[in-house]
């Protein structure tokens, strides 16, 4: 008998002197030494053989009278309820004058062999989407498995591009499988699970490994690997990069008053939005900064132009930058300083006058 094609196992026998019968046992003796009994007893109300615990039984017994004191009985059990392996069956009869010792025993001569269902076969295992943004939506996986009733559990691991493995899902069969694959029925020969959510992963490239643990012991590994999925960092942008509170277009020039030997200061403020694990630098200073911050910068005392750049870099090396060119403008008034942009001069807009840090005192020297 094959588990893959369930059918009934049936035995027939005749019992003479049926009126002296008290009870009957059908015994199943497995090749591993285990014995299971299927007991029946004569009912006082119907005078027929009835199972002693009918609510828990999968076997059936039906007897018909051949003559006044002989009955022919047929006992049936479906092979789905018999363990895999080789089995011998016996029948024990107990008379009503001694219900403890069998009055007769007979064994079926042939051995009944129950062949297991074929092992599960992974026909397809794929990640439908090959690219995700980190943390925005869970990773989806789909698979087809033939002979699912032999599944004990399904395990899914993620494998990083460095080769490290991490367990991300484990589903017991059939309870948890029905939760993630609601269309599956146990009588189906194919388990189809579509777009199963398996959670989130850090930035990087991954493949996924689906491993089946079968009900029966086997040395065969039932494993399949998916296509590669890329987890990209969250998008990010430089919301603003201001100088003394002014927002200039990237690449614009900011003119500042210059007097020889007198240092000048400007306040830089910025905000980088989105992303995660960003590296923010203020160049040419080259020191790591927070995504939202400010810095008082000492401008050069010479007459050279200088470019100030805010640079943000994510985990995979993607960069965004915002630059402002600062250029000195000669001034004879050191107590206050007017901050101009080329754009203001072109459009004849009055420059904004703001208070700045006090200049460093200059020692007197002869003309």
Image (tube, grey):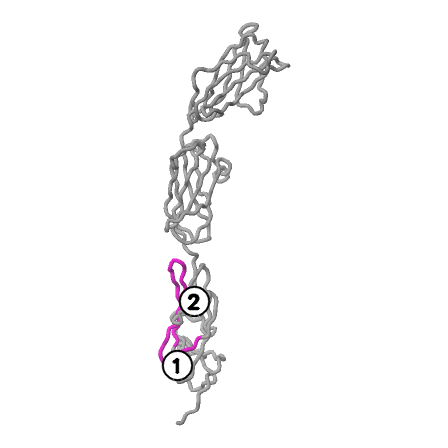
Tell me: residue 84, above or below residue 316.
above
Residue 60, position in %: x, y? Answer: 53, 19
Magenta stretch containing residue 316, yes or no? yes
Q: Residue at x 56, y 19 (%)?
A: 39
Q: Residue at x 39, y 37 (%)?
A: 222
Q: Is residue 55 left or right of residue 357?
A: right
Residue 131 in sight here? yes
Mark 2 crowdedness (10 Å alpha carbons): few <14, some 14-19, many ≥20: some
Foreground of the two, 143 or 345: 143
Q: Which residue is mark 1?
A: 301
Residue 102, position in %: x, y? Answer: 55, 14
Between marks 1 and 2 in the image, the one whose residue lies nearer the viewer: 2
Q: Residue furthest bottom?
A: 367
Q: Which residue is mark 2?
A: 288
Distance between mark 1 and mark 2 Cα atoms: 25 Å
Tag 1 near tag 2, CB within 8 Å: no
Q: Residue at x 41, y 67 (%)?
A: 281
Q: Which mark is residue 138?
A: none
Foreground of the two, 12 or 284: 12
Residue 114, position in %: x, y? Answer: 43, 24
Magenta stretch containing residue 157, yes or no? no
Residue 246 in sight here? no
Locate the N terminus and report the quarter of the image it occupies: top left
Range drawn in magenta:
297-326
Residue 148, position in %: x, y? Answer: 44, 33
Q: How many marks?
A: 2
Q: Earlier in the sequence, mark 1 or mark 2?
A: 2
Tell me: residue 286, above or below residue 26.
below
For mark 2, give the secondary structure: strand
Mark 1 crowdedness (10 Å alpha carbons): few <14, some 14-19, many ≥20: some
């Amino acid at each position: 008998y094959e588990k893959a094609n369930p059918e009934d196992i049936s035995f027939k026998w005749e019992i003479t002197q049926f009126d002296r019968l008290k009870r009957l046992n059908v015994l199943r003796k497995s090749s591993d030494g285990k014995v299971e009994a299927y007991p029946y007893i004569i009912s006082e109300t119907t005078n027929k053989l009835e199972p002693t615990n009918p609510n828990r039984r999968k076997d059936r017994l039906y007897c018909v009278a051949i003559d006044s004191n002989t009955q022919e009985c047929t006992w049936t059990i479906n092979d789905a309820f018999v363990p895999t392996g080789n089995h011998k069956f016996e029948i024990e009869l107990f008379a009503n004058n001694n219900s403890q010792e069998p009055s007769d025993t007979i064994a079926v001569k042939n051995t009944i062999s129950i062949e297991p269902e074929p092992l599960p076969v992974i026909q397809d295992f794929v990640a439908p989407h090959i690219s995700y943004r980190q943390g925005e939506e869970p990773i989806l996986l789909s698979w087809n498995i033939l002979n699912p009733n032999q599944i004990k559990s399904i395990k899914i691991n993620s494998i990083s591009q460095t080769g490290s493995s991490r367990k991300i899902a484990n589903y017991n069969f059939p309870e948890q499988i029905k939760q993630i694959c609601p269309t599956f029925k146990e009588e189906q020969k194919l388990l189809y699970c579509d777009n199963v959510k398996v959670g989130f992963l850090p930035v990087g490239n991954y493949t996924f490994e689906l491993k089946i643990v079968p009900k029966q012991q086997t040395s065969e590994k039932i494993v399949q690997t998916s296509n590669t999925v890329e987890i990209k960092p969250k998008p990010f942008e430089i919301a603003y990069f201001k100088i003394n509170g002014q927002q200039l277009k990237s690449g614009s020039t900011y003119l500042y008053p210059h007097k020889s030997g007198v240092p000048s200061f400007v306040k830089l403020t910025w905000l980088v939005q989105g992303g995660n694990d960003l590296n923010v630098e203020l160049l040419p200073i080259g020191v790591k900064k927070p995504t939202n911050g400010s810095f008082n910068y000492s401008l050069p005392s010479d007459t050279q132009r200088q470019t100030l750049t805010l640079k943000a870099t994510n985990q995979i090396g993607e960069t965004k930058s915002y630059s402002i060119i600062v250029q000195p403008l000669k001034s004879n008034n050191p107590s206050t300083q007017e901050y101009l942009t080329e754009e203001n001069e072109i459009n004849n807009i009055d420059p904004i006058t703001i208070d700045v840090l006090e200049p460093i005192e200059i020692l007197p020297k002869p003309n």
